[in-house]
Image: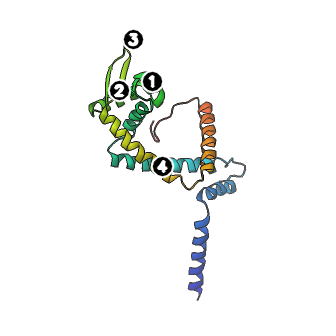
Amino acid sequence: MARESEAQDGHDRAAADASVYPVEEIAAAWERERPGTPVSSIGIVTPIWQLAKLLGDDRRRVLTRAGVDPATLDLLSVLRRGGAPYTLTTRELGRRSMVTAGAVSQRVARAEREGLVTRRPGEGRPRTVLVELTPAGHALVEATVDQVLYREAELIDGLTPGQQTQLAGLLRILLQDTQRKLGDDRISQVGDA
């Protein structure tokens, strides 16, 4: 009988633990062990890190199935969003992608080898390089962007449209403030250095 009672107690504790949000548990433990230590960031930063990992891993799986890497899709997407004739300078690509000139150069070289873009000298300025989306690059970005965006819409559909708008606004504020405090306005793929 005592074993049955212990087993039931263990089951009850497991059921109770399942309803506890782990992030709250972490914050509560730090408050208990280090009273006065600020823990409010745990409830924000930890889920952001967890979501970044989950969303980044899922996007990589989607892109792997589509046969394109994140950096190449970023390049093709920037060109596609630029509108016809889908041509931008390497400098503008860097600005819109928020990556360094070296990263743009590597991305363009890889996409050019794959027949997804072409590059040519710009007119009027000797060091200007124009990058243009090829028909193959256009087709790839058209097919892939739907896969990515429909999947991401599915992943956030647990929030109402109003909640999505509210969260997007709060995340924008947090991102801009964090960039200001860190003096860093670069944004790259999750996990990039």
User: Could you tell me how far apart the alpha carbons at marks 3 and 2 are, in whole angstroms?
Assistant: 17 Å
- The amino acid type of the residue labelled 4 equals Glu
Q: Position of residue 49 (x, y in %)?
A: 53, 47
Residue tagged 3: 125
Residue 115 in view (yes/no): yes
Tell me how far mark 1 sits from mark 3, CA to CA.
Answer: 14 Å
Query: Which mark's residue is nearer the viewer, 1 or 2?
Result: 2
Residue type at mark 3: give it.
Arg
Residue at image position (39%, 10%) is 124
Q: Is residue 116 visible?
A: no
Q: Earlier in the sequence, mark 4 or mark 1?
A: 1
- Whichever of labels 4 and 2 marks the residue nearer the N terminus, that label is 2
Q: Which residue is mark 4?
A: 152
Q: Callout 4 environment at 10 Å: few (<14), some (14 to 19), or many (20+)? A: some
Q: CA distance from mark 4 to mark 2?
A: 27 Å
Disc 4 to disc 1, how far (Cα)?
27 Å
Q: Residue at x 60, y 83 (%)?
A: 5
Question: Do labels 4 and 1 touch, CB within 8 Å?
Answer: no
Q: Position of residue 141 (x, y in %)?
A: 37, 39
Q: Which residue is mark 2?
A: 132
What's the CA distance linking mark 4 and mark 3?
A: 41 Å
